[in-house]
Amino acid sequence: MSFILKCLDCGHNAPYHPTATSCPKCGSQWREAEYDYELVAKIFIKNLIGRPFDLWRYRELLPVRKPNPSLSLGEGGTPLIRAVNLGMMLGCPNIFIKDERQGPTSSFKDRQASITIAALKEAGITEMVAASTGNVAISYSAYASRAGMKLWAFVTSLVPAVKMREIALYGSQVIKITGSYDQCKQVASEFARQRNLYQDMGARTITSIEAMKTIAFEIAEQLTYVQGPGEDVPWKTPDWYVQAISGGMGPIGVYKGFKEMRQMGLVKSIPAFAPIQAEGCAPMVTSFKKGLEKAEVVSSPKTRIETLATGDPGRAYEFLRKHVMDTNGTFESVSDEEAFRAMHVLAKMEGISAEPAAGVAFAGLFKLIRAGVIKPSDTVVVNCTGHTMPAEPSILGDNWSRDVKFPSKEETPREGLLSALTQVAPERFPKIAIVEDTLEARRLIRRILQSQGNFTILEAANGREGLEMIQRELPDLVILDLMMPEIDGFTVIEALRANPETAAIPVIVATAKELTPDEKNRLGDQIQALMQKGDFLNDEFLEEVKALIK
Ligand SMILES: *Cc1c(COP(=O)(O)O)cnc(C)c1O
Ligand SMILES: [Zn+2]
């Protein structure tokens, strides 16, 4: 489809060519592709029928004249997965994960690389330069190999060695820069300038922004499939779009996608944007919170999450800030530890192993829900941007594997095998009894505990069963509901305290209702902690659990 480039500074229109990277009138590098939306609106939905679910189905709004199937690796068309367990845990049932790990090289950079390389190939360009914190270079390298292009990949020395080797495996030249990512970009730029090579310019790259917007199109189509069409419009949009950012290219492109759909009458609204950064390198978040129009640069990033280490976002911040404010969104930051923990929770609760950068998005989600910024009734889409390979040792902690030596020749095979297997048996994990009459609540507490450590979990569905179980099993901790049939929680506590064998077992009371002063008195100092049921995701709850079973 034909399109023009509109300058975001002076409004001047110019034709597109990949190597012409600035406005011929004012010199600005910030321009945007514009299509004939009125025309496309008439044919768009109809044309989608029967097309495969990959990003080329939106070709009327992509900057490639003739999609070339021989370059494709099946990019785009990633699933939108409902996060049932996370939703239950967070009390926010409509959380969806846009699973960008399922791209050809396991990150959402595959959209950027596939469209950009297709456009370069069309323009007859055969060599290019990219600076990267890892994933961009992996993806460009894969697509460059298919297109017969040469890629010079500039990466910082913090990029994990496995990622560097993958870049090299596809045949690209890896250039390792000891310095920050911003310095790495400077070196790459100078190299490209000297040799007159095409260079990826992050959020200023037309093809990259156009590629990222296909995430918005897919979300709208997929959400419509699950929730039905929007009010008076064919497609549905979520209330929130959450993504971990470095340079901010993703959300800038996704915003453009929603904006184009709205312009064409396909959707009613644009979701609130929540870009999340790592605390140790969060120039956009701090600048936003200070109300600054230009970003304060972080010159030496202090995060272990190298994927997100853009210290100088440049003008991407201005544009993203505007989108965030226009959509009543917000910027948020999380610590590396919060991101690692979220990554672990995501894996244990939803079966999704994401890289730490994606953990940042989920940690941000947790924070915004807890703070009440994201409401329980909101529909949220979290972009799970990249796969983890390999898992960080620091996340798993010790004892994540058990080593078994196969029996040696001297032992009889049977005896040897048995003795080997005794090494697999778990040591005694702390026992926690959950006494709670609603199945949902029991499952939720069990899941939260399981996502955070190794516990043997016992369950009882009413006070009588619970009391018998506790007296029989002598658990290390009891999590107890108050309002239950047969014997209520108050009576259970009194019975436990009256029996010397169970008198010292710590009890956390979990209750859905506010207690009256009388009830509080009755509990007195017989219990160790009182929790509202909504508080479970609180780190406090887990801290409490861990402290009590020591
Ligand atoms: C590139 C990348 C990001 C950051 O994306 P931007 O939108 O460019 O800021 C986040 N997570 C992963 C896994 C990435 O590869
Ligand atoms: Zn201009």
Image (spheres, rainbow, N blue to C red):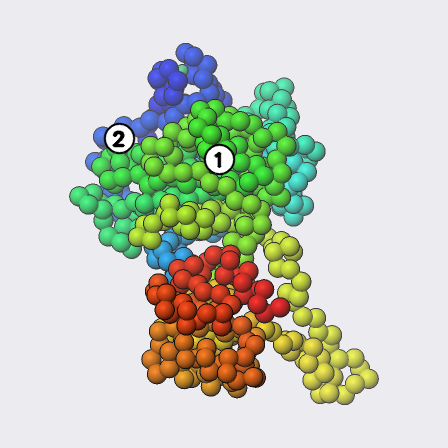
Q: Nearer the viewer, residue 518 or 414?
A: 518
Q: Quadrant of residue 536?
A: bottom left
Left or right: where 84 falls relative to 340:
left
Name the residue type under label 1.
Val
Q: Is residue 427 left or right of residue 263?
A: right
Residue at figure coordinates x 34%, y 49% from the top left: 375
In the displayed structure, 118 sits above or below 340; it is above
Instruction: Locate the N terminus by quadrant.
Output: top left
Q: Quadrant of the C terminus?
A: bottom right
Q: Residue at x 55, y 76 (%)?
A: 505
**Residue sticking out furthest to the right:** 410
Residue occupying image coordinates x 60% and y 74%: 429
Mark 1 surroundings: few (<14), some (14-19) or many (≥20) residues within 10 A? many
Q: Which mark is residue 285?
A: 1
* Picture coordinates of residue 295, whole percent (x, y): 50, 27
In the picture of the structure, the residue carrying the numbered disc 2 is: 37
- The residue at the point 52 percent across, 84 percent down is 499
Relative vertical location of residue 101 with respect to residue 39 in this rendering, above or below: below
**Relative horizontal placement of residue 38, taking residue 222 as reference (left or right):** left
x then y, percent, for residue 388: 56, 52
In the picture shown, does residue 409 fall above or below 377?
below
Q: Considering only order in the chain, which callout, 2 or 1, is on the residue closer to the N terminus?
A: 2
Note whether residue 290 is visible: yes
Disc 2 packing (10 Å; few <14; some 14–19; many ≥20): some
